[in-house]
């Protein structure tokens, strides 16, 4: 089945937006999406996302084998393939090098504090995957540790990757983390972010639940106090119905377990 022209147009639109917004330079970045017949389309390697046309899009199967002659898929295809394997719900993947988010990634800093309500409500904490040599298995291996619990991951000394239910959904997540990283950067110049209190965060979780919103990645992993309702992987914090002294012990235990999980990553 030939690739869907609307899907190709959307992929080109996302590539042009990435380039225009300065989230990539030169031939940086790559984008892919699931086609109707279950294969993928992806940007070819080594082309500016600002100059992308339909001839710079290649259809590949789930093993990364090109289904069109004479076109070489993105060198980061291994990462895209691994994400689709790990997350069957994902329909599109965007990889870019947005300067503020990549600045955090290069400084070894995750965006994992609860600072802005819209980030708490949508993406949650944005983890930092360890460094992997671009185009090798090291990148998907590093991303796999996080992509199950987050739709956006920073890549150490490299960039960021976002996933979504559509190309635009994945693109907007990239735009969101870049904007967020920029705000955090400015706040740090001004003395540092004020982290939302557990009560403030709990209220946001309630709002999110009422609105039927979900994100995979809840909680402020870097905060001192854990927030009711926050989860790391399968483990969620729920202190309801506990007496005061039990609650204090439970909070301490949960904090220790979560801290050790974070250190392991
Ligand atoms: P490709 O041109 O091969 O997609 O690589 C660009 C890139 O950003 C690598 O990380």
Image: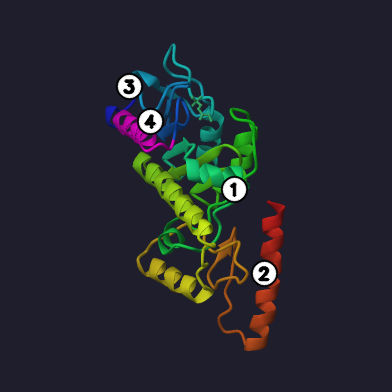
Residue 69 screen position, x and y as percent: 43, 12
Of helix, strand and loop, which one carries label 4? loop
> Where does the N terminus fall, quadrant-wise?
top left
Are the two marked residues, 3 and 4, in contact with CB atoms closer than 8 angstroms?
A: no
- Spot the residue most to the front: 190
> Mark 3 vs mark 4: which is more N-terminal?
4
Q: Which residues are magenta?
A: 7-23
Are the two marked residues, 4 and 2, in contact with CB atoms closer than 8 angstroms?
A: no
Residue on which disc 3 sits: 54
Residue on which disc 2 sits: 255
Residue on which disc 1 sits: 128
254 relative to 48 in the view: left or right: right
**Structural distance between the alpha carbons of marks 3 and 1:** 33 Å
Residue 251 screen position, x and y as percent: 65, 75
Which residue is at a point 42% across and 62% down the rendered structure image? 121
Q: Nearer the viewer, mark 4 or mark 2?
A: 2
Of helix, strand and loop, which one carries label 2? helix
Among the 4 quarters of the image, the one containing residue 165: top left
Front residue of this view, candidates 193 and 219 = 193
Front residue of this view, candidates 135 and 98 = 98
Q: Residues within 10 Å of mark 1 (few under 14, many from 20)?
A: many
As drawn, 63 above or below 161: above
Are the two marked residues, 1 and 2, in contact with CB atoms closer than 8 angstroms?
A: no
> Mark 4 vs mark 1: which is more N-terminal?
4
> Mark 3 vs mark 1: which is more N-terminal?
3
Task: Say whether residue 164 is visible.
Answer: no
* Residue labelled 1 has its Cβ within 8 Å of some atom of ligand 1: no
Q: Nearer the viewer, mark 1 or mark 2?
A: 1
As drawn, 68 above or below 209: above
Residue on which disc 4 sits: 37
Which residue is at a point 43% across and 37% down the rendered structure image? 23
């Amino acid at each position: 089945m030939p690739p869907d022209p609307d899907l190709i147009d959307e992929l080109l639109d996302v590539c042009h937006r990435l380039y225009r917004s300065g989230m990539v330079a030169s031939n940086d970045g790559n984008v892919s999406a699931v086609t109707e017949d279950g294969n993928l389309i992806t940007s070819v390697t080594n082309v500016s996302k600002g100059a992308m046309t339909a001839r710079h899009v290649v259809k590949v199967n789930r093993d990364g084998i090109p289904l069109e002659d004479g076109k070489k898929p993105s060198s980061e295809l291994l990462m895209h393939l691994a994400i689709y394997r790990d997350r069957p719900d994902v329909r599109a993947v965007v990889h870019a090098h947005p300067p503020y988010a990549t600045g955090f990634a290069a400084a070894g800093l995750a965006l994992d504090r609860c600072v802005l309500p819209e980030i708490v409500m949508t993406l949650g904490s944005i983890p930092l995957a360890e460094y992997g040599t671009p185009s090798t298995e090291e990148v998907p291996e590093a991303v796999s540790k996080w992509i199950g619990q987050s739709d956006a991951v920073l890549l150490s000394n490299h960039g960021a990757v976002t996933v979504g239910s559509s190309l635009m959904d994945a693109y907007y997540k990239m735009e969101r983390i870049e904007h967020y990283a920029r705000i955090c950067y400015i706040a740090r110049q001004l003395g540092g972010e004020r982290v939302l209190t557990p009560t403030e965060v709990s209220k946001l979780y309630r709002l999110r639940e009422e609105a039927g919103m979900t994100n995979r990645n809840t909680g402020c992993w870097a905060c001192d106090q854990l927030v009711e309702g926050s989860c790391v992987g399968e483990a969620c914090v729920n202190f309801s119905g506990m007496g005061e002294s039990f609650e204090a012990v439970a909070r301490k235990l949960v904090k220790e377990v979560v801290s050790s999980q974070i250190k392991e990553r």
